[in-house]
Image: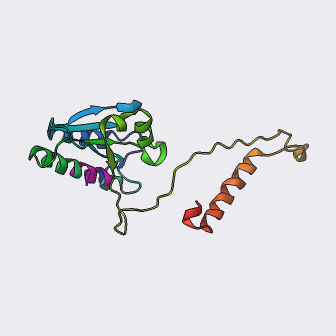
Amino acid sequence: MHIHDHPEPGNKEYRAFNLLTDFLEKEGFTVSRGVVGLETAFTAEYSNGKAGRRPLLLPSSVGHACGHNLIAISGVACALAMKQLLQDGLLSGSVALFGTPAEETSNAKLVFVKAGEIQRLADFAMMLHPGPASGCFVNYLAMDSVLIEYFGRQSHAGASPWDGINAVDALMQGFDNVGMMRQQTLSTNR
């Protein structure tokens, strides 16, 4: 509830970051803060010192958006359960939990991959995501970036506006057209 009740903007999830990292440290995880160049990103690791599988759990530490408060606490709960199995000798290996801030905008999971952190600490990765149905294999929409530049031509608004090209009008038309077209397409086309 604490993360839910105190939403924070992406890459500024200081309250959630401190809450999660302090808790994980108290639970016996080795916590590294501010990893991969992101101030509110973290890793939390636990190992029983035996060779074995190395699962990775990927919670988002932000408070809202797609229920990230639920994703964060679900990841922590799974890491605690895995830690208990490791302590009881029922599993060999380690478990890692990555706090990935601003997931909806800066795609912190990809930053972890590019930095080599996921490959260094894990054999496979898992994530829980809240939703209205249960499913193990679900198609998700991708997050891609596109850079579009608009160029205009200045003119005097009172003397010869017809000589100008308004780049802001073109930008607004493009934005509106994509918004309207998105309503009429299948989810798979987005």
Q: Is residue 73 magenta?
A: yes
Please give left or right for residue 146 compared with residue 18 in the image.
right
Residue at 20% over, 41% down = 93
Please give left or right for residue 161 compared with residue 102 in the image.
right
Depth check: give the residue in front, 141 or 1: 141
Question: Could you tell me how many numbered marks the image carries?
Answer: 0
Farthest residue, direction left? 88
Residue 40: image location, x then y, percent:
35, 36
Please give left or right for residue 71 compared with residue 76 in the image.
right
Farthest residue, direction front? 51
Magenta region, main secondary structure: helix
Give the magenta range. Answer: 71-77
Residue 54: image location, x then y, percent:
26, 42
Which quarter of the picture shows residue 42? top left
Which quarter of the picture shows residue 138? bottom left
On the rendered image, what quadrant is the C terminus found in? Answer: bottom right
Residue 185: image location, x then y, percent:
61, 67
Residue 20 seen by the camera: yes
Depth check: give the residue in front, 152 or 186: 186
The vertical placement of 94 against 1, above or below, is above
Residue at 85% over, 43% down = 164
Which quarter of the picture shows residue 30? top left
Residue 24: image location, x then y, percent:
20, 41
On the rendered image, what quadrant is the N terminus found in? Answer: bottom left
Residue at 59% over, 62% down = 189
Residue 39 seen by the camera: no
Q: Is residue 133 magenta?
A: no
